[in-house]
């Protein structure tokens, strides 16, 4: 029987084929350009109908986050609409760390990825459809190093300046699925949550902060290997024009509330990270963040507060990270939302694990929590 064929020469594709034998393959993840980061993969297998595939992704002990592989199942789709999970296992001792994916496709083409991809073509559809909605203004904040537009959507008539931005790390594609869910809510003229928020807030939404890394199939960096979420204190036109453009726009509007949307490779639940340790920290500012966190935890079982990142000690916050920079720079209630690549062990969904659908639903809960939070601010 002939060998399967594997390729990744498409938007957000990433894999290196080391060898193919029938329906088995040895593979490796390519590093981000001009960077050591490697974790995102996205490739296509053809000639596979009815054959049990064994796909071995090797060298993962040197990936960006080796702790993300145990307990992880790769995502797979045969129609690029529904993304399920393929049975996967990790052996840290095999070929310098190997993830073995096993799957038998019904059709002749199957797509595999680290998480359900959010391509630049889908991004353009999202921006165009949102910009055509009543009350939405489009702005191009700047141009990336690869010449792509940095898209921003604005809506709402209120005084509270709310910034929502995602995919500083392009391989965290659940972040733009979250954005799709948020924009579906906010552009719905009949949605009661949206009506309340549009009345009180002016939203500034950047669905994808890193178009270049997204198209190139990067995990964490832009076209020249820059981790954008370490650039917020001193962004530059030659290294991080994306952050420079967004921060300049924030300076022009001001920021009252900000959410930076991400994904975490190892922690299998959704959580928030705040801005503890900024030089200007006050308990009042911190309590505004903690209150939002409590509201969100009450609204959905897909969010929790037990697991998360270690809080910075007083005065030690890294101001090159956006959440810390915005809290310090504007006195904003700023936060980083992290979603999992794995399944939520307290609310498992074995067929899909954490999924585009759950990312979009969490966006709605985040917005409903914001409306409640604003109401308590006025009380």
Image (cartoon, rainbow, N blue to C red):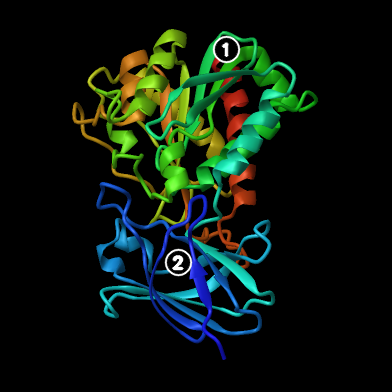
Residue 217 picture location, percent across and down = 43, 51
Q: Looking at the picture, does residue 35 appear above or below residue 189? A: below
Q: Name the residue under label 1.
A: 378
Q: Dot 1: what SS? A: helix
- The image quadrant that residue 351 belongs to is bottom right
- The image quadrant that residue 21 belongs to is bottom left
Residue 201 picture location, percent across and down = 59, 15
**Residue at 31% over, 55% down:** 31
Please indicate, yes or no, whether residue 305 appears anywhere in the rendered image. no
Q: Is residue 136 left or right of residue 114?
A: right
Q: CA–CA distance between discs 1 and 2?
A: 43 Å
Q: Residue furthest bottom?
A: 1
Q: Quadrant of the C terminus?
A: top right
- Dot 2 surroundings within 10 Å: few (below 14), some, or many (20 or more)? many
Q: Looking at the picture, does residue 35 appear above or below residue 207? A: below
Earlier sequence position, callout 1 versus callout 2:
2
Q: Dot 2: what SS? A: loop
**Count the marks: how many?**
2
Residue 264 picture location, percent across and down = 41, 50
Residue 57 picture location, percent across and down = 38, 72
């Amino acid at each position: 029987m002939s060998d399967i064929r594997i390729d990744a020469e498409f938007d957000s594709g990433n894999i290196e084929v080391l060898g193919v034998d029938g329906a088995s393959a040895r593979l490796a993840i390519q590093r981000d350009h001009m960077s050591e980061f490697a974790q995102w993969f996205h490739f296509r297998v053809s000639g596979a109908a009815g054959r049990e595939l064994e796909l071995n992704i090797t060298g993962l002990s040197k990936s960006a986050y080796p702790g993300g592989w145990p307990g992880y199942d790769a995502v797979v789709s045969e129609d690029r609409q529904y993304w399920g999970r393929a049975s996967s296992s990790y052996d840290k001792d095999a070929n310098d760390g190997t993830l073995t994916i096993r799957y038998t496709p019904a059709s002749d083409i199957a797509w595999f990825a680290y998480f359900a991809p959010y391509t630049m073509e889908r991004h353009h559809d999202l921006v165009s459809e949102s910009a055509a909605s009543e009350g939405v203004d489009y702005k191009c904040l700047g141009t990336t190093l690869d010449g792509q537009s940095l898209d921003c959507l604005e809506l709402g008539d209120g005084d509270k300046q709310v910034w929502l931005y995602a995919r500083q790390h392009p391989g965290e594609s659940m972040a733009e699925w979250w954005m799709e869910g948020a924009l579906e809510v906010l552009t719905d003229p009949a949605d009661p949550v949206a009506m309340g928020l549009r009345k009180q807030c002016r939203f500034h939404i950047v669905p994808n902060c890193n178009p270049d890394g997204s198209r190139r199939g990067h995990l964490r960096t832009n076209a020249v290997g820059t981790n954008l979420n370490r650039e917020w204190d001193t962004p530059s036109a030659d290294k991080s024009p994306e952050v420079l453009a967004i921060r300049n726009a924030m300076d022009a509007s001001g920021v009252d509330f900000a959410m930076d949307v991400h994904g975490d490779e190892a922690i299998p639940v959704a959580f928030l990270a705040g801005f503890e340790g900024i030089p200007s920290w006050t308990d009042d500012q911190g309590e505004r963040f903690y209150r939002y966190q409590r509201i969100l935890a009450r609204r959905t079982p897909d969010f929790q507060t037990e697991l998360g990142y270690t809080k910075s000690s007083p005065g030690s916050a890294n101001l090159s990270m956006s959440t810390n920079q915005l809290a310090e720079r504007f006195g904003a209630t700023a936060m980083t939302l992290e979603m999992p690549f794995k399944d939520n062990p307290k609310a498992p969904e074995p067929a899909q694990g954490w999924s585009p659908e759950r990312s979009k639903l969490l966006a709605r809960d985040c917005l409903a929590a914001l409306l409640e939070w604003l109401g308590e601010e006025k009380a």
